[in-house]
Every structure is written in C-alpha cells, then in structure tokens.
Amino acid sequence: MANPMKILVIGSGGREHALIWKLASSPRVSKLYCAPGNAGISQLATCVPIPATDLASLKTFAEREAVDLTVVGPEAPLALGIADLFRESKLKVFGPTKNAAKIESSKAFAKNLMMRQGIPTADARTFESVRLALDYLEQCSLPIVVKADGLAQGKGVVVARTVQDAKDAVVNMLEHRAFGDAGRRVVIEDCLEGEELTLMAFADGKTVVPMLAAQDHKRLGEGDTGPNTGGMGAYAPAPVATPALRYAIMRDVLHPAIEGLSRVGSPFFGVLYAGLMVKDGTPYVLEFNARFGDPETQVVLPLLKTDLAEVLEAVVEHRLDQIHLEWSEESAVCVVLASGGYPGKYEQGLPIAGLQDVSGQDRVAVFHAGTAWKGEDVVTAGGRVLGITAWGSSLRAAHDRAYEAGRCIKFEGQYCRTDIAGRVLT
Ligand SMILES: Nc1ncnc2c1ncn2[C@@H]1O[C@H](COP(=O)(O)OP(=O)(O)O)[C@@H](O)[C@H]1O
Ligand SMILES: [Mg+2]
C-alpha cells in the first residue's frame, strides 16, 4: 500500500467541491485542505483563508503542513506561475507551468500552436494595432468573432453579427482596455457553426488519457439565449461524442497539442480541456483551457470509478501510461442554481434552505459554488450558488433526479435554467 496523501485543492467553486468530494472517497487520502474553499467544501476539507492567487502564502502553507500534492482548480494561479513556484520548492503540484498554461492564458499563443500543429480551428489573425484591426474587419465576412488575447473571466469574446459590433469590440478591448492587459492584443477569427462539446484529458507531457465528453450551457436563458455566464449546467457523457469522434479529437487535437507544447520546451502536466465546435462529425477547436472545466467537472467526476488521487499522482510522477480510467455506464446532469440578477448585479448573504433534505438522497451531490457560513447558516456568496448534480441509468433519469432535488432548495431570487440537457432529451 502506497503512502497516505495530504492534498491541498486551490479554488472555491463547484469544480473544487467536486474535486474534494471525489478525493474524499479515496483510501489514499489522509487529509484534505482547500484554499479558500466554501461552505460545502468545509464539510469535507479544512478550509484555509488564502486567496487562490496569493502564491507565496499558498507555498508557505503547503511547506508548513507537509502537503503531498497540491491540485490547482482555477486558471489565474496557473497563469501566475504557481506550478513553477511549487516545483522549484520541491512541492508536488497538479497543473501546468506558466509557459504551458499559455495555451489558455493567451489565445494568440494557442492559435499559433494550432496552426503549427495542423489542429483544426477557425482561421484567425492577431492584432495589437486598432487601425490594422479595423481595416481588417472591413473585408471580413459576417458573423465574425473578436477575442481578447488574455484571461477575461469568460467575458472577452464577442460573436459579432455586424461590422459595427465587431469594431466596437476591437475599440473596447484595444483602446479602452476593457479587460486591462488581457486586451492588449485581440484575435479576430472566423465564426464556426455546429455543436459545442468539451473533452478534457489528463496529460503528463507524453501520455494523454481522455475523460468522458461533456456539454456545458453557457448562456443564461432558456434555449441558449441571453448573456454568457460561467456555465448554467452540464451533462455527460454527451451522445454527440461517438467513439469515432472521440478518436478524431484525440488524434487531431489533443495529441498534437500536447506534442506541440513539448516541442517548444513547455511539456504540459495536468488537465488539458478542449472546447470544440463539432461540424459534420469534424471537431474544430474554439479554445483550450489548462485545467478542469466548471461545471463539466461536476458531471464527469461522479462517473469516474478510478481513484482520482491515484490518477493525479500518476500525472505528477509522469507515469500516466500506467493508468486506465474506468467509467460508470451511467449519465450525469448538473443544474446550476444562481442568484437573481446574475451575471449582472445580485444580492449576497441570503439564507439557503433545504440543503439537509437533499444531503441524504441517492445519486445526488450538491456542489457548492458561491456559498459561505453566517453563524450556523449557509448563505449565498456568489453569482452561481449551487450545482445540483444527479446521476442515473440514463440522461433522462439523471435529469429528473437533479431537478427534483433542486426543488427542495430555496433562497430568495434563485434562478435556474429549466432546459439543461433538454436538447438531447427531446
Ligand atoms: N470561432 C467561433 N465561432 C463561433 N462561436 C465561437 C467561436 N469562438 C468562440 N465562440 C463562442 O464564444 C464562447 C466563448 O469563447 P471561448 O473561445 O471559449 O472563450 P472563453 O471561454 O475564454 O470566453 C464559446 O463557448 C462559443 O460559444
Ligand atoms: Mg470557453
């Protein structure tokens, strides 16, 4: 029997709660910490009030507590170089170096990598000059997509239906610096049509092991309308991801991306997330992320039978080739309960009722995102508050169970989409 592990998870959302929940079931794990965590996470792990971007304090904490493995949830600490700092200090960390994480933190870098590796994606050009970008837009066909190069918390992409909208986006990003330095450069790319799909894979620089494919629901409103959000729900496995399509994504997207990063001296260790548009059975890359997706993780991990701690350790020790992932035959659905007003302004600190009623239910997990303790009560503390995940023998069964559990939970102004997974159930 291998040594027991003390694990630190960094982050505070539904993704991190799902990671902690899964790790808590591992016989390998002796202690779980989360920085900073949330109310739900605090029931499974010791939460430490260190922000995810305070790298120096995180490092000090990991050294002091003799943490065996640190798992990085969000993109911001990766882009700041947390993996580099931990490795220099001989601390084991699950997540890519700053240079490898550029595949997410710079859309221009990712585009260049894709071009070099022949990875199918929309044709694109990168601009720093407002004038050149505006000139270019005069001759583009519509719709056209304008993206801030850097991290913009899911708000840096405009799918423009008119030349004026595209120009406004360029001026906003390059001139008004709406996203700060993230908008120092813009990528202007052709608009792709089709069905969106996420495939995440574990990678140790060489071996690539895919998870189940999932679909997210980014828009706030029913029928994929309204503003973009952090994600209003997800399901897995996505029926559109046939074995043939998964094979094509591995061969044409994930393997070439991992190989391309190694080739430039930045081997990728962690989870590589491919955000894809599937058209006529062909996958095109919309973007890469350098970490687990949120809320995709909340539907993928409940279906994983393999011990997650073993998988994460194998990645960090560069022996992922020894790992075979086993998956349940079931399906999972996650419905996000959000604060009224999100993704705009919303109230916080509202009491959440009904959590007890759901906690014992079979094949249901309530993953907390924006929650906090106020005395003895759990209250809202963010835009996306909870993700109700349920699983069962079919997407229909998982869907019905998730919505039924969701009905037990009440807080003022709560909002959820009623059509999560609807597309594949009709
Ligand atoms: N080339 C494209 N064609 C059509 N839609 C796109 C394209 N690029 C992005 N989108 C849409 O915009 C969303 C956000 O873009 P993405 O590149 O994933 O950036 P981010 O997640 O960093 O905001 C995508 O999920 C997709 O719906
Ligand atoms: Mg995206």
Image: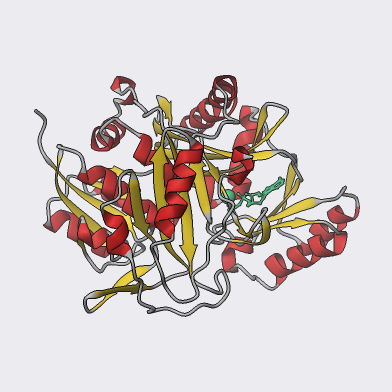
Of the pair 265 and 355, the residue shown nearer to us: 355
Q: Is residue 291 visible?
A: no
Horizontal side of residue 405 vs 92, given as left or right: right
Please state the horizontal and vertical placement of residue 170, each as a whole percent of the image: 75, 63
Horizontal side of residue 408 vs 165, given as left or right: left
Residue 191 image-quadrant placement: top right
Please state the horizontal and vertical placement of residue 286, each as a whole percent of the image: 64, 42
Above-or-below relation of 245 to 294: above
- Please say which color scheme the image uses: secondary structure
Horizontal side of residue 257 vs 30, given as left or right: right
Quadrant in the picture for the N terminus: top left
Which residue sits furthest right? 139
What residue is rendered at 37% in x and 35% in y? 303
Residue 354 image-quadrant placement: bottom left
Of the pair 306 and 158, the residue shown nearer to us: 306
What residue is rendered at 37% in x and 79% in y? 349
Above-or-below relation of 335 to 343: above
Residue 204 image-quadrant placement: top left
Please state the horizontal and vertical placement of residue 344, each as a whole percent of the image: 58, 74
What residue is rendered at 51% in x and 26% in y? 255
Quadrant in the picture for the C terminus: top right
Please state the horizontal and vertical placement of residue 408, each as a whole percent of the image: 38, 62
Disc tally is: 0
What residue is rendered at 42% in x and 47% in y? 401
Q: Is residue 330 visible?
A: yes
